[in-house]
Amino acid sequence: MKLLPHQGAEFIATEVGGLRDRNGDSHPVSGSGHAHAALARARSPAQTARAAVGCLGKPRFLGVVADRCSVRDVASQLPTVGIGRCCSGSDVADQWTIPWRSGKHRWGFFLGLGIAFVIAVPLGLMLGISERLYALTSTVVELLRPLPPIAFVPLMVLVAGQGVEMKATIVALGCVWPLLTNTIHGVHATEAVAKATGESFGWGKWTVIRRVVWPSSLPSVITGVRITVSIALILCVGAEFIGGSTRGIGSWLLQQSMLPGGMLSVTAGVLIAGALGVVVNAIVAVLDRRYAAWARRGES
Amino acid sequence: MTVDWTSPKTRTVFGWTVAILLIAAWELAAVVGDSLYFPPPSEILREAYDLWFSAGLANGILTDAFHQDVVSSIQRLLIGLLYAITIGIVLGVLIGRQRVAAELIEPLLHFMRALPGPVLLPMALVLLGTGDSMRIALIAFGSVWPVLFNTYSAVRQVPESFLDTSIVSRRSRASTLFHVILPASATGIFAGVRVATGLGIILLVAAELVASAEGIGFGLTQSQRSFQFVEMWAFILALSILGYVANILLSLLEGVVLRWHRLYKAVVA
């Protein structure tokens, strides 16, 4: 893989010196030497995994495939087309802003999360409070919960197109269940004594729910949100890949990976996607500290 | 008549009644509405049967298409997850036991955990090509982080008193690892494996999308692009069953491995 002209000079200066000459071509000898080193390191996990496969009653097909695509293949390919060769720090920085500007990625994400929240939390409160409703619906929930939401991407592309609506639906579909089960769990974990105390104050049903049940299930709801945001991000990007969206960080990455020298932008995009995840997680962590920390104070 | 809504028995009876009623309602709505995108469940089941189970008793019931579509996907998923779980647990324990390493690596770990797995697909394409090893590597690399992170934090949260007891009773380091640290962190590890499995299925579908000629993900997108809606639903069904079965298997495994934990909780509480 040749480097693009504008990348060349700085690249050689900043990146692993010994691996390539001035033209940016790697020396095969040193390249393979690198591969051997990686190989030596990779050998043990590969063997561990193979041993683990053997423990499962030696199903032969598993062993064959494990041989065919062992860590060894992967490791021997890494240095030859290595990440280090395709991007230096500052070049990646030049690409920072592009994927950020390129997308409605965020709207699918937030909209889906919002829909999931609006559906799941009131529903979870209802199912948590009413034993009857819970008995009637728990089987359906248990049946629907493990379904991989990604399976519905092709269907949603047909029904809702490739845009934000599709992404939001998929995100909502995947996020409803963890939120719902966590809300129900939170309501069920409400202390009976606290509820009885509220009732003995002469509070009505709604007051008890608002002032006792809801605050005490809030930590569990926030745990649900914490699980949900990472799922939402994954689903959003996954839906863009599979649905063939034209906008958003996922589709942008897929396009870039097919261009010559696109590795740079791909690396930048991956870094940005990761940073986005970190930011979102940080926001939820703040929420968690604000509204849910009290629940854990007693434990430790 | 009063019904005890909290007993597991009524819950099963009424729950399944509602589930079956809902499926019947779907069937009815699909037949009446005659929508192109939402075929009735009976038709989906027949299509799934024709696709995968119609080879006849003599040929072992399963068709070639079953091996092509389903078995290859399951193989990739299992192998990828096996790598992810093995590497995740081993590294997680190592990092969790080394305070200095943990402090150094934790920010990176947070970043990798927050990184949505599918964005790695283009990178994997460029680095590893379009073969099966790419798909397995993507599944393994993408789903290793929940296992690693959960193992790491579970190992760090093992109470010091457990470890002190183990030192006092002169256990070897290996024995401490296998009889104290790993069992004590098993709940956390299982939570990670659960997340990893869900993630693995997403990555599987994403990875089978490009430059693949077999697998559930491939069949799913292929049938959508050729407007074979019933076939597409059959693939959705297959993927759903895959997710469902994976969930059941994990629950069973968890029940066996964590039996002591439930007993312990029952005693403590």
Image (cartoon, coloured by chain):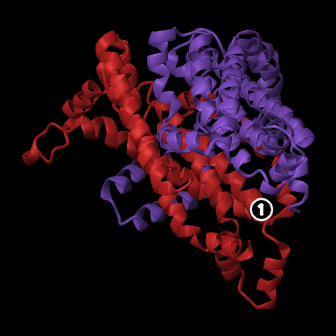
Seen at 45% across and 24% down, the residue is B210
Tell me: residue A92, above or below residue A206. Answer: above
Placement of A59 over or under A15, stated as above or below: below
The percent position of residue A191, horizontal first and vertical second, equals 79, 54
Q: Which residue is mark 1?
A: B96
> Looking at the image, which residue is at 51% across and 68% down?
B256
Left or right: residue A76 compared with residue A282? left
Percent of width and height locating residue A30? 64, 42
Q: Is residue B110 above or below residue B151?
A: above
> In this image, A5 relative to A191: left or right?
left
Category of crowding for the residue at label 1, using alpha-carbon neighbours closer than 10 angstroms: few (below 14), some (14–19), many (at least 20): many
Question: In the rendering, at what x and y percent does residue B235 appear?
Answer: 35, 29
Q: How many marks?
A: 1
Task: Please state the horizontal and vertical placement of residue B215, each as a whole percent of the image.
Answer: 36, 33
Q: Quadrant of residue A45?
A: bottom right
The hue of chain B in the figure is red
Q: Which residue is found at the position 87% from the left and 43% from the top?
A: A202
Looking at the rendering, which quadrant does residue A13 occupy? top right
Q: Nearer the viewer, residue A264 or B195?
A: B195
* Shown colour of chain A: purple
For residue A108, what is the image quadrant?
top right
Q: Quadrant of the C terminus of chain B?
A: bottom right
| Subunit that carries the residue with mark 1 | B
Q: Using the rendered image of the protein, determine whether residue A23 is visible from the camera's viewpoint.
A: no
